Amino acid sequence: MGRPKKIQDIVPKSNINVTLKSLGRTFESVGETFEEAIGKIKIGNGAKLTSVLIVEKDGVKKEKILGGRTTGHLFGGGSPTARQIHIKQVSRMFDL
């Protein structure tokens, strides 16, 4: 008979696809959580520009325009605390 399966084994995990368009460049990332997907995108000097963030989860695609300050804190260098604050704000924008 064996042991019963756990819920984690039965329910497949859905990945989150994140695409960032900034200054004519496109960055793509996939992660199990929104924070993981955002963390995989790194931008150098062009991180303080207005950009478009596209998030796709479970077949639902949403686009939002991010200001320069938010883009800089999420994808550029800076303090981890400010990054966490902006991740929380952006995740609320996308209802995640």
Image: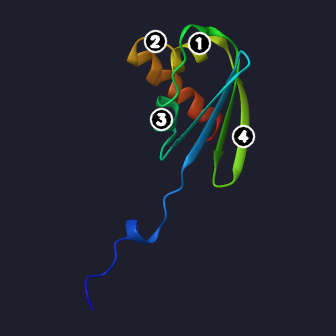
Position of 59 relative to 8 (above/below): above
Mark number displayed over residue 86: none
Q: Earlier in the sequence, mark 1 or mark 2?
A: 1
- Per the model, the C-alpha gap separating discs 1 and 2 is 9 Å
Q: Nearer the viewer, mark 3 or mark 2?
A: 2
- Per the model, the C-alpha gap separating discs 1 and 3 is 17 Å
Residue 28 location in percent, x, y? Answer: 61, 34
Q: The C terminus appears in which quarter of the rendering? A: top right
Question: Is the residue under label 2 in contact with that under label 4 (CB below 8 Å)?
Answer: no
Mark 4 = which residue?
62
Mark 3 = which residue?
35
Please report the residue visible at 39 percent of the width from the left and 18 percent of the height from the top.
80
- Per the model, the C-alpha gap separating discs 4 and 1 is 21 Å
Please report the residue visible at 52 percent of the width from the left and 27 percent of the height from the top.
41
> Based on the displayed image, in which of its 4 quarters is residue 48 positioned?
top right
Please state which amino acid type lies under the numbered disc 2: Gly
Q: Earlier in the sequence, mark 3 or mark 2?
A: 3
Please state which amino acid type lies under the numbered disc 4: Lys
Mark 2 = which residue?
77
- Label 3: how many Cα within 10 Å (few below 14, some 14–19, many 20+): some
- Per the model, the C-alpha gap separating discs 4 and 3 is 16 Å
